[in-house]
Image (tube, grey):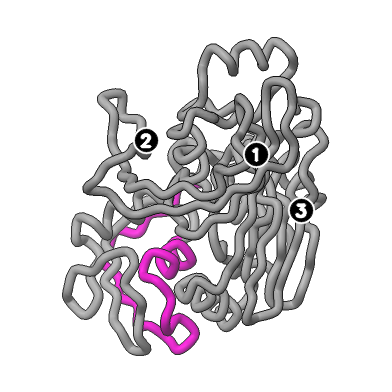
Amino acid sequence: MKENFHQVSFYKVSSEYKGVRLDNCLISKLKGLPRAKIYSIIRKGEVRVNKSRCKPSYRLQKDDEIRIPPYTTKPKINKKSSEKNIDKVERSIIRKETSFLIINKPVGLACHGGSGISLGLIEIIRQLDKKYKDAQLVHRIDKDTSGCLVVSLKKTILREFHKEIRNKDVDKFYAAVVKGHWPIDLQKITLSIKKENLKTGERVVKQNQAGKFSETEFKLITAGLSNSLIRAKIITGRTHQIRVHSSHKGYPILGDVKYGDASYNKQQKLKGLNRMLLHAESINFKNLGIEQHAPIPEVFREYV
């Protein structure tokens, strides 16, 4: 069913959205509009706050007036695929609280719909129960990464989670299997990285001195004959940070089609590898006292 909104509309920010980022507010309000489209209308200045252009990261204040341009949504939902994913997500909830959920996100499922994806995890969550209709992602992990993902059910806790993230009071640990023997003394990687668009249209992150500073701490867990199981702690939260850092040092993550070793990945695929071996193992909001662990998938041990 196509939804048409032919006229400019205005939304006055209520107290529940005070402190919420402009992009997250629009994602919540304009359900069914692809995330990429939302960022596009913000960048083009079609969205205005108090008659002025704003960045997606602008934090709203009570009584701000948001101008929303005309838009059209046309959800494309494959019923069988939808039902399968709904069941998968429901079984992946590892913690339920009145104000938030924690999901052990399945590999291959995007956090958001849009860009050719009919339903992402957050859209599925909103379908599970009427209590979840206002669910919002607290943070994101890549489509091809599994593991801990926090979803807020109330605006008040969302603000608290975002405050923790802004103040760097969150510990995030990832497990990964990388090609080669990870040196036991390689415990920290820092790199200036920047998003770039290739001629094919693909977006990648590369080392660039004009880019943003990024830092990851690493620890060797198990050294195998050809590969290593490592644990990574994110200090800065840049896009694809762990993948770029490990690849830069010559230890690409198995199954990583963007930054990995294509020839080696092909060999591993013949042995049965069908995913990227990167997993969000745990998350800890230190001041809120909220901590969750998602066990490393058994398949990781098979390649070490």
Question: Does 82 sit above or below residue 20?
Answer: above
* Mark 2 or mark 1: whose residue is earlier in sequence: 1
Mark linked to residue 243? none
Contact check, label 1 and label 3, Cβ < 8 Å: no
* Mark 2 or mark 3: whose residue is earlier in sequence: 2
Left or right of residue 295, residue 109 in this image = left
**Residue at the front extreme?**
185
Task: Give the x, y percent position of residue 234.
Answer: 54, 56
Left or right of residue 59, residue 243 in this image = right
Question: Does 297 sit above or below residue 170?
Answer: above
Q: Which residue is mark 1?
A: 176
Q: Which amino acid type is shown beneath numbered disc 3?
A: Ala
Residue mark closest to the camera, 2 vs 1: 1
Mark 2–mark 1 Cα distance, whole angstroms, equals 20 Å
Residue mark closest to the camera, 1 vs 3: 1
Mark linked to residue 204? 2
* Range drawn in magenta: 1-30
Q: Which residue is mark 3?
A: 294
Q: Nearer the viewer, residue 59 or 247?
A: 247
Q: Quadrant of residue 267?
A: top right
Q: Quadrant of residue 273?
A: top right
Task: Give the x, y percent position of residue 227.
Answer: 67, 26
For the C terminus, which image quadrant? Answer: top right
Q: Residues within 10 Å of mark 2 (few under 14, many from 20)?
A: some
Left or right of residue 64, residue 250 in this image = right
Task: Give the x, y percent position of residue 295.
Answer: 80, 49
